[in-house]
């Protein structure tokens, strides 16, 4: 199995866990769990593949990805009641998934010889859009919009870190590890210690 | 007209009716009716065609599909006030549209020689995503998320039934009929008799 | 720079301004501004390019588009507090962006030799879907659904005007100007003078 395939499978599995946990908050049945888990798991990568106009979307070529997502959904369906806080678990699993999906997106863009700007953007799309679709469909406040939290920033930082590493001729697998590490470190710091960028403030916040 | 084209036209027409009815609940004007009707009618099939990387999206090749959707929108604009319960009408028309769209998706996937897993998934995408887009854009609770109702399950069952029928060398048109029949029967049973799968239960349902 | 590229850049810039203003209403940080601005700015054109199956999505070919969107986001981040009414500014900028995006969509469809119906639809998609994605993700009421306002109608009118002009052998650049002018005039009239089409009325408006 190539590194790229491993990253894709890992991000599919972990994103599927978060999707299934959101499905559990909406009290769906097992098929609903699998549906939301799959949407979350392959949404970002599907959009990446379509925008890059790849010949075949990754999971159409290898339907096993959907099997992995379904497995994650089943696991959550059977065990989610054991969790102390499902919301906190979603947050941390989502952080792990982000940290794996961003290098997966970066690697696909590199494989099609894109310039650094597109490499970074594909990292962001792969990392952020699966969760975004999950939240929009399930009517949760999208994590990408959570005020005073780093999210898209983490994906972007991962993509930039990988691009810089590659510029200095660091081998690709190492660059992807650096990418995953920086994305996760930033996101974890934001969840745990409240790291954030200055937000826009205006009074009143939502004038009509 | 091929069976595939007939299925596509029929599902476009009936999904457009549901879209227009949702537009009537949002009190839009005629163009708004046509817009939401078209989005609902071709949304699922468009996503299917894009993911399968077909050369041309079906309605770009035959713009008459959009004309059919517009006709359905006009029909609803003129007659929706005669309905006793628009919500119930939406539910039942949506069930019919689902029962036609799933075999349409299955047929396209078969025409491109996909394995059974992708055939089933394309049935689900074609059947469920048009209505999902309608509900997300119009801010209705997505039917796919309605607690204690079968929806994605019906689409999946239709796809599985078709795959099994084809495995036993039943001719494709018959297999597609079986597909439509099983999807509709399950959905109708769920609406009328409350058939459902066990849902995930946890207390409290939405912890923060 | 071709007329087509100019239209695309202009609509990207102005739609990005509206996206950033919506981000300011949600009190995001600078990266959030850039994210929502880019989504709004290239969302419609991306969908157009994917549906038309163009070889490369426009901004993947020329990442400068994203740079333009980021610039617009920065501009709004630094100056939005100076605005008297952000909502009114969003409305009018969105009207300008619509008036530029519709001819951009029309021009791309013409370049790929589509029939008038598809030309008009591509104008609508390019003009309306970026703002629609912005509003759905940020949980604002989509402008396309605002009751008693012309929105999709303006995009459609622009596309129809261009098609008629081209039918009478008016040169393409002039036809695109007529397209932009009619879309803007209708939208401006709707915002300023309340122009609207008759809306569907039923009592009670949202029966369950």
Image (cartoon, coloured by chain):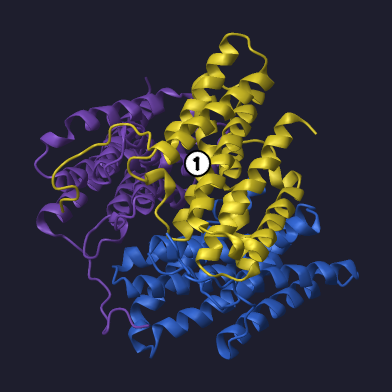
Chain colours: A yellow, B blue, C purple
Name the residue at the top extreme.
A168
Q: Residues within 10 Å of mark 1 (few under 14, many from 20)?
A: many
Vertical order, B115 against C148 (above or below): above
Q: Is residue C181 visible?
A: no
x 37%, y 38%: residue? A194
The C terminus of chain A - image quarter: bottom left
C5 horizontally vs B12: left or right = left
Relative side of C188 to C72, left or right: left
Q: Pick the residue in front: A125 or B201.
A: B201
Tell me residue C205's x, y (percent): 28, 79
Task: Establish if B152 lies above or below C172.
Answer: below
Figure quadrant of residue C175: top left
Point 69% across, 65% down: residue: B4
The total of numbered circles placed on residues is 1
**Who is closer to the viewer here, A47 or C25?**
C25
Among the 4 quarters of the image, the one containing residue A140:
bottom left
Q: Which residue is more in the foreground, B136 or A162?
A: A162
- Residue at image coords 67%, 25%: A111
Mark 1, residue position: A128
Could you tell me which quadrant the N terminus of chain A lies in? top right
Q: Secondary structure at mark 1?
A: helix
């Amino acid at each position: 199995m190539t590194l790229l395939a491993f990253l894709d499978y890992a991000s599919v599995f972990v994103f599927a866990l978060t999707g299934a946990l959101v499905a559990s908050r909406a009290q769906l049945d097992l098929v609903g769990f699998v549906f939301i888990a799959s949407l979350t798991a392959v949404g970002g990568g599907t959009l990446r593949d379509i925008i890059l106009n790849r010949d075949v979307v990754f999971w159409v070529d290898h339907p096993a990805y959907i099997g992995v997502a379904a497995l994650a959904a089943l696991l959550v369906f059977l065990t989610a009641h054991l969790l102390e806080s499902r919301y906190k678990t979603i947050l941390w699993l989502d952080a792990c998934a982000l940290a794996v999906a961003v290098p997966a997106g970066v690697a696909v863009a590199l494989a099609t010889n894109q310039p650094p700007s597109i490499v970074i953007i594909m990292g962001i799309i792969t990392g952020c859009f699966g969760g975004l679709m999950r939240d929009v469909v399930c009517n949760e406040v999208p994590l990408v919009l959570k005020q005073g939290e780093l999210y898209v920033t983490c994906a972007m930082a991962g993509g930039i870190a990988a691009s810089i590493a590659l510029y200095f001729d660091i081998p690709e697998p190492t660059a992807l590890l650096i990418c995953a590490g920086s994305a996760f470190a930033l996101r974890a710091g934001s969840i745990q210690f409240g790291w954030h960028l200055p937000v826009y403030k205006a009074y009143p916040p939502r004038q009509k």
